[in-house]
Image: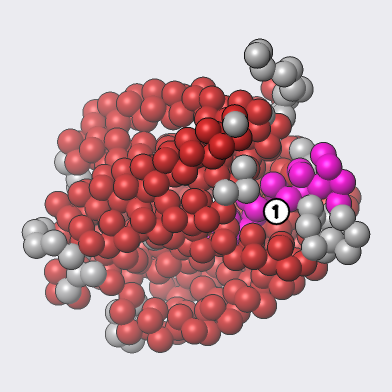
Amino acid sequence: MGDTAVPAVVGRRDAVGIAVATGVSALSGYAALAVATNTLDDDAGTVFVTWWSLLFVLFGLLSGFSVETTRAVAAARRDGAPAGAPTVRRVAVGVAVATLALCAAATPLWTHVVLPAGHAGLVVPVVVGALAFAVHSALVGALAGTRRWAAYARLVGAEAVWRLVLVGAAALLGLGLGGLAWGAALAATAWVLVVLLSSATREVAGQRLDAAAGPVARRVAAATVAAGASAVLVVGYPALLAATTAPADFRGSAPLLIAITVTRAPLLVPLNAFQGVAVAHFVAHQHRGLRALAPLAGAVVAAGIVAAGLATLVGPALMSVFGPGYRVDGALLGVLTLAAVGLALLTLTGALCQSFTRHRAFVAGWLAATGAAVLVLQLPGGLEQRAVLGLVVGPAVGLVVHLVALARGTREAAR
């Protein structure tokens, strides 16, 4: 049987707008990190990169809420929202409250394991940024679910640009490590200005989801758990390294941490920005099963190979923008970029699991990937070797879990 024709999820003009917003987001993130590392000394730079990783772990966790909002809003628009289904606004408030509770519970871990002694105050901007990002995630998800791509692109771009502006201002004013942290965290409030200026963004806050409050809460919980596990590997790996490495060995690791961060950006920043598009695409093409994954996976692998070659050749020169002490071998940069391909594919299979409402498989894959990476980091060896091996083995294990579950689901649907 041939595939049923389905209208394109995103038009060419909107796709270009999202691509531009994604590029701005990636470059703004690079620039903000470069401003911080050139402003701070080596030890403070390592603390900032670790803190940045912690902040973006929480942002990554909340991206699961965003993707589930995309799926739920898209499904409600397609099939109709049931009576009593909560609005995006109501769910956002609930997630913000849950985020505050999570941060309160995790603070002892952050202050005693992840952040060095004497930097407990850096937890406060993390919490404030996470609360603001909960609302940002709800709005981004709803805009994607309603296919309002222009407003989606504006919100994604505004948050990243606001971060660069605030971090740059903190650097110019000489506010030090704390000021830079507050600048990076408060960028998550950019949605306030966007809501004031954009009627589309205000309107989607009232969109209803595709189920009653109970099922929505369970699905959001599953999505955020899986996204939290993915965020540890995607953006929180420096924090994970800090938690599994002796403080004396971790000092001076800022060049490796920056290398890990920047080598995944060429693949994962665009993919994360287009994740709402991917979920909407998978929802619209559910009849294709695993075949819906093939074109996107092929594009990711091809882009990863090209990016790895470029990282090997020009990566060392580009690393110099972070400061004269940030020297990393081209071969290592190439390997780290190839490792990011596995993470990108795992992100795609996770989005496919979410689109098919296979939330247990979605969670299991990411938890398996994170668990495998943590086990690898317990092995003997240097920090660099353990870091690379964990980035390769973890996603490979998660991919197997996702693909087995998706293949089983496809077979069951075909019966």
Q: Assess disc 1: are there few (<14), some (14-19) or many (≥20) residues with their C-alpha within 10 Å of its C-alpha.
A: many
Residue 296 at what x, y percent from top left? 51, 27
Q: Is 74 contained in the magenta span?
A: yes
Instruction: Please state which of residues 58 and 379 is positioned toward the viewer in this rendering.
Output: 379
Overall secondary structure of the magenta stretch? helix
Instruction: Please state which of residues 387 and 413 is positioned toward the viewer in this rendering.
Output: 413
Image quadrant in which you'd find residue 18: top right
Q: Which residue is mark 1?
A: 69
Q: Residue at x 13, y 61 (%)?
A: 379
Side (left or right) of 382 relative to 110: left
Residue 321 shows up from this direction: no
Callout 1 secondary element = helix
Q: Which residues are magenta?
A: 60-81
Q: Is 401 contained in the magenta span?
A: no
Side (left or right) of 101 relative to 158: left
Q: At label 1, which amino acid type do we have?
A: Thr
Q: Determine whether 268 is above or below 238 in the image.
A: above
Side (left or right) of 144 relative to 392: right
Residue extending farthest front: 415
Q: Determine whether 309 is above or below 244 in the image.
A: above
Quadrant of the drawing holding the N terminus: top right
